[in-house]
Amino acid sequence: MDFRWDLVISSVPLLLQGAWLTIKLTTIAVFFGIILGTLAALLRLTKGPFRYLASIYVDFMRGTPLLVQIFIIYYGIPSITGGQISPSIVDIWPFIAAVIALSINSGAYVAEIVRAGIQAVEKGQSEAALSLGLTPAETMRHIILPQAFRHIVPPLGNEFIALLKDSSLVSAIALEELVRKGQIIVGRTFRPFEVYFVVAILYLIMTVTISRIVSILERRLRVGE
Amino acid sequence: MAIIEVNNLHKKFNQLHVLKGITTRIEQNEVVVVIGPSGSGKSTFLRCLNFLEIPTSGEIIFEGSVINPNENLNLIRREMGMVFQRFNLFPHMKVIDNITLAPKLVRNIQPDIAVEQGLNLLEKVNLSDKAESFPEQLSGGQQQRVAIARALAMRPKVMLFDEPTSALDPEMIGEVLDVMKSLANEGMTMIVVTHEMGFAREVSDRVIFMDDGLLIEENTPDELFNNPQHPRTQAFLSKIL
Ligand SMILES: Nc1ncnc2c1ncn2[C@@H]1O[C@H](COP(=O)(O)OP(=O)(O)OP(=O)(O)O)[C@@H](O)[C@H]1O
Ligand SMILES: [Mg+2]
């Protein structure tokens, strides 16, 4: 058995570049995912017709593979806009497509998390706020959402971790995130074991770090409960 | 002029007919106690008054004008304070912030003035030292007194109490009833659902007995307790007194 430690070490710098892109992609996608997801969750709680739109969005994103969604955005959007994308963004199109796909996918999961968080707040809370003369919107903003936030943080951390791992799927559109960088090194060295081993360790470091941050945040939020 | 008039109020939850035509008037400065068996509709009646439940039919007239459920109900609700069985303090806010939130947000009171008024109210309910505490750090009786102060901070014209002492340990009931008594003595118009018959006798001007969604009988506490007219009232009182 030979395990090429030298390869492990020499592949690290390039893989770290990939990991950095993975972190950027995931963070941006979770950021937009939280905005989209909160909007979708609030829409689902309204009485008007938009509630159905939000439901369709959530069901579609959760009911279809992320890889297909990535392809729809990456290949699909240029094809329906005349077969080409503007030269000014052609270089960064894979990145943009990946961010769009991951954001709208993540938004659907966040919507469910936010909805569950809102529903976990006791009904008496909104009744007390309404009885004081707050409008439904003020009640949501000052009473329900701050309390829902505490229920939302732990599953949101899980969503961040899941998305970080799922972001490896964008290697399929040649975006050089962590997995793609690994594939490139393997193509040169023909040593998949060592390379993917380092890839796995880098993912592990990132996910464990996120878990830690989330539990610290959770503990902070519990103060004054 | 009555401050609240209730005309033929009905409330259904789907098939369940909970209020079957309630008609009564609440006068300015009056203290009305509502009693009746569990499930008779006392809470629903109270919650219809500030439209936490939308009546199925009938009218609520507040200060001479009919409340329309399609208008801004928050304009009506701010005039009626409500105190709940389970306190419902906002757990993520300090006591003082619980009290000042609505005055600042709804009445546009300046923050420093809202705090000053809030501290006065806390003094009134004997909790001056708890302004900076969070609700979970307080006993049930203390939480309920904060809840009363929170409702009073909006300077409501009526206070609605839904079994304010039912969730309390016995030794804490007195401190909450004392606050309610002094409020009554100051002339606050109050509608109180309670099982505290001592409070009803001592403080109320009128007692309403409800059963099965109907207002069966209403009278002064003396008359209602000592000389109940309706057989259902007699049966209920014989069970609890
Ligand atoms: N939101 C609701 N949906 C369906 N049914 C309800 C709802 N609120 C109350 N009810 C029903 O209406 C009836 C009257 O309830 P209500 O709470 O007004 O009674 P109550 O006199 O306050 O009783 P208690 O003394 O137990 O508090 C009960 O049968 C109750 O189950
Ligand atoms: Mg009740």
Image (cartoon, rainbow, N blue to C red):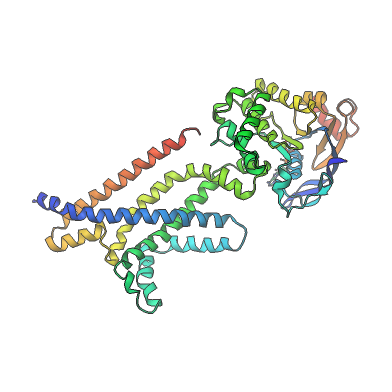
Q: Position of residue B191 (x, y in %)?
A: 78, 35
Q: Position of residue B8 (x, y in %)?
A: 84, 48
Task: Ligand 1: give its quadrant.
Answer: top right
Q: Name the image quarter holding the N terminus of chain B.
A: top right
Residue in view at x 27 percent, y 46 percent: A205
Residue B108 picture quarter = top right
Q: Name the image quarter holding the C terminus of chain B.
A: top right
Residue in view at x 23 percent, y 55 percent: A17
**Nearest the camera: B4 or B48?**
B4
**Extreme left residue here?**
A2
User: Can residue B11 be seen at all in this image of the molecule?
Assistant: yes
Image height check: is A63 above or below A146?
A: below
**Nearest the camera: A4 or A11?**
A11
Q: Position of residue A197 (x, y in %)?
A: 19, 52
User: Can residue B87 be seen at all in this image of the molecule?
Assistant: no
Image height check: is A69 above or below B232?
A: below
Image height check: is B66 above or below B208?
A: below
Residue B211 picture quarter = top right
**Extreme bottom residue here?**
A82
**Left or right: residue A219 compared with residue A141:** left
Residue in view at x 65 percent, y 24 percent: B123
Count of numbered labels shown in the rendering: 0
**Left or right: residue B214 compared with residue A200:** right
Q: Position of residue A14 (x, y in %)?
A: 19, 56
**Left or right: residue B239 compared with residue A5:** right
